[in-house]
């Protein structure tokens, strides 16, 4: 078995923007005359889609959202996010992201992105970072109504890669996911993928319990070594660490 595709999470892996998201969610809650997020709610939101977060936050405060109003909230937050990024002279991309993407591309591996963020948020960042050409498949919060830790986004990414590359015959166990949160890693695992945990959001030792590979920084990722592991017969039972 060989490694054929690498699938990136977005927030917390490509761009360091969790603080922006948390602040914008609080601003919308206040605009809706609701209490801002509690500490445990902020923690549980990491790695999950805005859709899931708003549904849970409003339910916790005794309000049920219709689909139409939920979409209004999501679009309000997305627009606010875009305005925040437009204020920045330089995007807060994680160090090493360009290098690892170029490495993957140079090895003729397919790339995809799986995130609960809205497509317009993702495309804005990738365009400004001159990286959008490397991601022919993007599964965003516009495409699915479930959130990580559900595996739907990762499963859909495999389907789309196979549609785009009919001769690829991609299977989930030929994909490597790069995630920064336990819920994201759970989603990839449920889709039967191997996972790299990068300690951008959670400490190394927490991710290490669940990931197949764990790194402090993307620069530490040894892609050649990972490809060798995929070629081993018992890849599903190996849990090496970089």
Image (tube, rainbow, N blue to C red):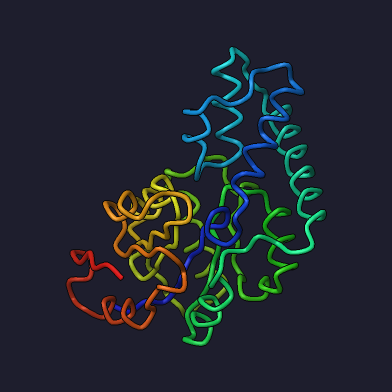
Q: Position of residue 115 (x, y in %)?
A: 56, 53
> Which residue is at a point 33% across and 66% down the rendered structure image?
173
Q: As drawn, is 189 to the left or to the right of 164?
A: left
Is 31 rendered above or below residue 134?
above
> Could you tell me which residue is drawn at 46 percent across and 69 percent down?
218
| Count of labels in the image | 0
**In the image: residue 237, left or right of residue 32:** left
The picture places residue 29, in percent across and down from the top left corner, at 69, 25
Q: Quadrant of the C terminus?
A: bottom left
Q: Position of residue 190 (x, y in %)?
A: 34, 50
Is 144 displayed left or right of 29 in the figure? left
Residue 101 x %, y %: 54, 76
Q: Is residue 223 left or right of residue 237?
A: right
Residue 178 vs 25, above or below: the answer is: below
Task: Judge by depth and name the residue closer to the eye, 239 or 95.
Answer: 95
Q: Residue furthest top?
A: 62
Q: Which residue is pictured at 74% across the width and 64% down the height? A: 90
Quadrant in the picture for the N terminus: bottom left
Quarter occupied by residue 204: bottom left
Residue for point 67% across, 23% down: 66
């Amino acid at each position: 078995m060989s490694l054929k595709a690498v699938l990136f999470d977005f927030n917390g892996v490509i761009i360091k923007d969790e603080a922006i998201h948390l602040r914008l969610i609080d601003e919308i809650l206040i605009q809706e005359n609701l209490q801002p997020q509690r500490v445990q709610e902020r923690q549980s939101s990491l790695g999950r889609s805005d859709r899931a977060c708003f549904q849970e936050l409003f339910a916790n405060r005794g309000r049920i959202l219709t689909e139409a109003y939920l979409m209004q909230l999501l679009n309000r937050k997305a627009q606010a996010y875009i305005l925040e990024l437009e204020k920045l002279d330089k995007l807060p991309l994680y160090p090493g992201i360009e290098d690892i993407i170029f490495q993957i591309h140079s090895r003729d591996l397919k790339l995809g992105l799986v995130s609960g963020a809205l497509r317009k948020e993702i495309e804005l960042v990738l365009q400004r970072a001159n990286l959008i050409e490397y991601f022919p498949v993007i599964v965003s919060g516009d495409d699915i109504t479930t959130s990580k830790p559900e595996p739907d986004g990762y499963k859909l990414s495999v389907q789309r890669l196979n549609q785009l590359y009919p001769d690829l015959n991609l299977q989930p166990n030929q994909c490597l996911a790069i995630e920064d949160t336990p819920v994201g890693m759970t989603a990839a695992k449920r889709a039967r993928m191997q996972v790299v945990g990068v300690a951008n959001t959670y400490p190394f030792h927490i991710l290490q319990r669940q990931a197949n590979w764990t790194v402090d920084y993307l620069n530490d990722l040894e892609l050649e070594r990972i490809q060798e592991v995929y070629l081993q017969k018992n890849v599903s039972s190996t849990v090496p660490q970089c």
